Image (cartoon, coloured by chain):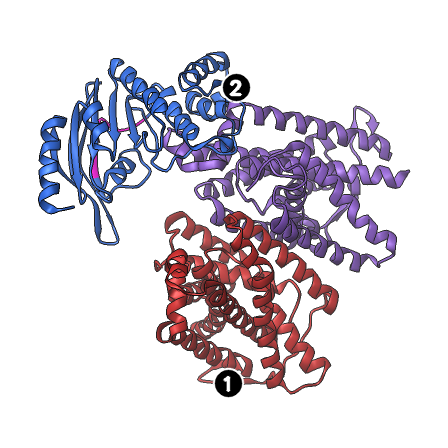
Chain colours: A blue, B red, C purple
Amino acid sequence: MSHLEIKNFSKQFDGIKAVDHVSFSFESGKITGIIGPNGSGKSTLINLLTGVVQSDSGVMIPQYNQTTLSITRTFQEVRILEQMTVIDNILIVLTKRSVWVSIFETQKEQHFKNAKKVLEKVGLWEKRNELAANLSYGQRKLLEIARAVAMDATVYFFDEPFAGLFPEMRKIVTSLLQELKKKDKIIVLVEHNMELIRELSDVCLVMDSGKVLAHGSPEKVLLQTEVIETYLGK
Amino acid sequence: MIPQLILNSLIAASIYSLVALGFNLIYSTTKFFNLSHGVVGLIGGYVTFYFTKTLGLEIIPSVIVGILAAGLCGYFLDKLVFRKLRNKHASDMVFLIASLGLMTALQAGLAIVFTNQFKLFSIETKTIHFFGLMITYVHIMTLVVTVIVTAGLISLLKKTRFGKMVRAIGDDVEVSTIVGIDTNKILSRVFFIGSAIAGVSGILSGLDVGLGPNMGLSLLLKGVIASIIGGVGNVYGGILGALLLAFIENIGAWQISGEWKDLFSFGLLIVFLLFRPQGILRK
Amino acid sequence: MEYLLHLFILISICAILGISLNLILGYTGLLSITHAAFYGIGAYATAVMMVTHSFPFFPSLLAGLVLSGIFALGIGSILSRFSGDYFALGSFGFNIIVSSLFINLQGLTGGPLGISGIDRPSFFGFVFSDRLAFLALAIFFVVMIYLLSQWIVRSSFGRTLKAIREDEKVVQVFGYKTLHYKLAIFVIGAMMASVAGALFASYSSYIDPSTFDLTGSIFVLAVIVLGGLANTKGAVFGAIFLVLLPEIFRFVGFPSALAAELRQVAYGLTLVLLMLYRPQGFIGAYKF
């Protein structure tokens, strides 16, 4: 898959245009960063693209379905499965999405191995049988990221994965993102922190009030943004 | 035949809309389906029955006592159970199960105190004929009372400060608390008012057809269906839903048989859940 | 001794109901307030097959399984589109409808008077007529259903069910058609409940609609909430406790009609107190 194209995505909530006719083309092997002030529609856009919220309009090419285009993501508010173990949180994205197949699961060992690999990368393997509810905030975030990364998907959406993480943990997440890049995946990174976007993204989108204000290479776009922000005194 | 059908439907719809009114009021503020609503209304009916038939009090004071009893019952259920659950930030399921438990215990309690026997306590059974239609005094009272109570509640919600606070809580509980509204106090009153209205429906229903401990359930079910098909949490929706429910039920009973009334109500609910789960009117 | 055997049989039947509802509610998070309806469908199917058509017990049980599966498929496919409150209310209504069917389809079900004269099971000539034999049969079914339940819970399918309980939206985002899973477990649970119904019908030889109405569903709910949701052993424990507890009323000498209502009060209060002070029940595996 070389790119994911989105055309004309919009969503209104009670008359407010949270996302206003957004179109873009996300390329594989690149990290596309999305930045913008609070309320600019970044998270809503991700929610529209991942099916969490129904969009008012918008087309994705190719269409999202498990066989041609699979999507995985993390959430800004960290949605892990609290009353389940750490390893179950990973295994849930690895098993086949079919009632019949999952009753008669045959690939248990393979899934287990894959879960082990990714949990070791984030340092949660020792806690694999702990309930997710008992983890610290940083560990919860890492678990969520591990869950997203464990799945072999086409498009990866990360919604503020670095927020609240200590520097050592941030390094882990960065290396995971780099690995995904090497595998030629499509990676979308929503972040609040301009430094991270500058450092990590290959292409950058700036959103404000539901619209795409600017897009291009991080240096070019962020310079524009800083100018706009200084001008508008945000 | 048709005009009588319409009249019968209007009368049934009145009872249903009273239940839905209280139910919606409680739902719109607390955001949970209070399954004990029906039996609390029934308590109003039984208390009125007790005061008028057993103690020999005049009907009007008995009715007032009955309404107060229902209101107080709801008030105490809130104070003793639901408020505590709110403070614990309990999940929806916890509220539902708790209200289910209350419904069961109260219904059985009524059966213990008043036995399972059906109680009749009509005060005036004369039927009036006008324009070829039949109607009883109780039916006339039902229509009149429903209009008064509904109008009263709507003006309470729209025109008073209390009503404003109720609507604020319905929109956003946290913001309301921050702004300084004593949510627990307002909610206690909401429970009182909603339960009192349910009591009215229990009394009217009892005067019309009599009382049995299981009636709380059927009142609840009709009220819930009317609320859902009308649009949960919406006062006007409950009225529309009640009208639609009553009409469909009566048409069904006319065409097929009275025993299958419940099936028609449920069928209507299913149709709405399948095709328009948000109901006729949105919140 | 006979009395003890009687209690154990009731506990076994109750345990089957609890284990099966637990799969739906405890593990998948669906508040189903209609379990007694499937209990009843199993009981009536067995009763009608055995009394009216002279079928032996085991084929009748099978007929009950199929019938409740069909009903569950029907109502389940509508309810599974929802969660939480609407699922609960819809199931609540369904129980009321099925109850009224049991009462009104007089030609088939005998109406409020029910069906009597249901025989004990016979298997290649051996009749489970004495209590000890029937208890053995009942325990056999409990064990089978217990093992089946554990197998489901430990499988990938079970993991998805738990995930649906935790956060259905996330499960959907990751590509699962959660409706299918909810429907599947609803049907499985309903079919297990019908086994309990078949056993009950054959054991007590007489059934009537009052056992299978809403109060029955609320009873099963109380059993698993008391024992602790999402725990198969908890369901068994709850069954033991809630079957034995009301026997105290009988010993103290209350007349049986009053005892029945007092039992209801007890079940209702149990639920309320549990919700207020210990929603995770006795075993406490799952906090909700």
Inspect the image, locate mark 1, and give the three-letter code of the amino acid beneath it.
Answer: His
Mark 2 = which residue? A104
Q: On screen, B225 above or below C124?
A: below
Question: In front: A202, or B151?
Answer: A202
Q: What is the distance, in whole Å, between disc 1 and disc 2 at their CAs?
A: 70 Å
Q: Position of residue A150 (x, y in %)?
A: 38, 20
- Determine crowd level at label 1: few under 14, some 14-19, many 20+ residues with C-alpha closer than 10 A: few
Magenta span has A61? yes
Mark 1 secondary-structure assignment: strand
Question: In front: C25, or B262?
Answer: C25
Q: Position of residue B12 (x, y in %)?
A: 50, 70
Residue located at (69% from left, 66% from top): B110
Mark 1 = which residue? B129
Q: Quadrant of residue A169?
A: top left
Mark 2 secondary-structure assignment: loop
Residue located at (53% from left, 26% from top): A130
- Determine crowd level at label 2: few under 14, some 14-19, many 20+ residues with C-alpha closer than 10 A: few
Q: Nearer the viewer, mark 1 or mark 2?
A: 2
